[in-house]
Image (tube, grey):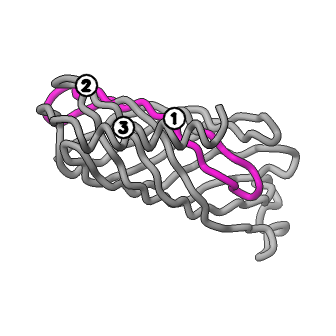
Amino acid sequence: MNTLAKSLIIAFVCFLTFTLPAHAVNSGWYLGFNMGSAEVDVINESDMGYKFYGGYLGENFGAEIAFVGLGDGYTPENLDVSGLSFEFMGRLPLGSSFSLLGKFGIFWWTVDNCDPGYYYYYYCDEGTYIDGSDLTYGLGLQYDLNDRVSIRGEWEEYKDVNGSDISLLSAGLIYTF
């Protein structure tokens, strides 16, 4: 699926989120943790990815900040990719417990190409870190187990991270305060 098609789908979900009536779903401040598979498109390799996140999600909109780890061990250089994301979210309730999520925002990333082996401190210097900021967007599905705990599955795309797009497919738990 190309970038234009993905952008149109996300825009459509966000439009529906703001125009359809809301249902009783978990709303408020929350913290969560997701874990899954991160894949780099250029080299077609994947590794474990994760994110710790928190934010506010109302009945139809919200905002989220997350620390994201997109894996390490890509290529012989042993790249470690991580960063901080800030995303605006739209939510489309699909009943009393399910919600479809759309999100877009910015990702501030760092790529560390140090070898984490025995001689780590001897080989790492200031020139081994590359950083930048780029677009991120995604789609997800959330199921509210009760009024405090939810399960969330997400697909997120991190664009142009050091010249590569990285996709994160993850699932996790959320606690709403």
Which structural element holds mark 2? loop
Residue sitting at 42 percent across and 55 percent down?
87
Is residue 138 placed above or below 81 in the rendered structure?
above
Residue sitting at 66 percent across and 44 percent down?
166
Residue sitting at 65 percent across and 31 percent down?
1
Q: Which residues are magenta?
A: 142-167
Residue hosting label 2: 94
Residue type for callout 1: Trp
Q: Is residue 41 left or right of residue 88?
A: right
Label 3 crowd bin: few (<14), some (14–19), many (20+), radius 10 Å: many
Residue sitting at 78 percent across and 34 percent down?
44
Query: Of tags 1 and 3, which is closer to the observer?
Result: 3
Q: Main secondary structure of the magenta part?
A: strand
Residue type for callout 3: Leu
Comes first in the chain, label 3 or label 2: 2
Is residue 119 placed above or below 177 in the rendered structure?
below
Residues tagged 2 and 1 counted as in contact (Cβ below 8 A) = no
Dividing the picture into quarters, in which one does residue 86 lie? bottom left
Q: Is residue 24 left or right of residue 137?
A: left
On the image, the x and y values in percent for residue 29 come to 21, 52
Residue hosting label 1: 155
Residue type for callout 2: Leu
On the image, the x and y values in percent for residue 173 come to 34, 34
Q: Nearer the viewer, residue 45 or 92?
A: 92
Q: CA distance from mark 2 to mark 1?
A: 18 Å
Q: Is residue 117 left or right of residue 147?
A: right
Dividing the picture into quarters, in which one does residue 134 lie? bottom right
Label 2 crowd bin: few (<14), some (14–19), many (20+), radius 10 Å: some
Residue hosting label 3: 101
Q: CA distance from mark 1 to mark 3?
A: 10 Å
Is residue 25 placed above or below 73 in the rendered structure?
above
Comes first in the chain, label 2 or label 1: 2
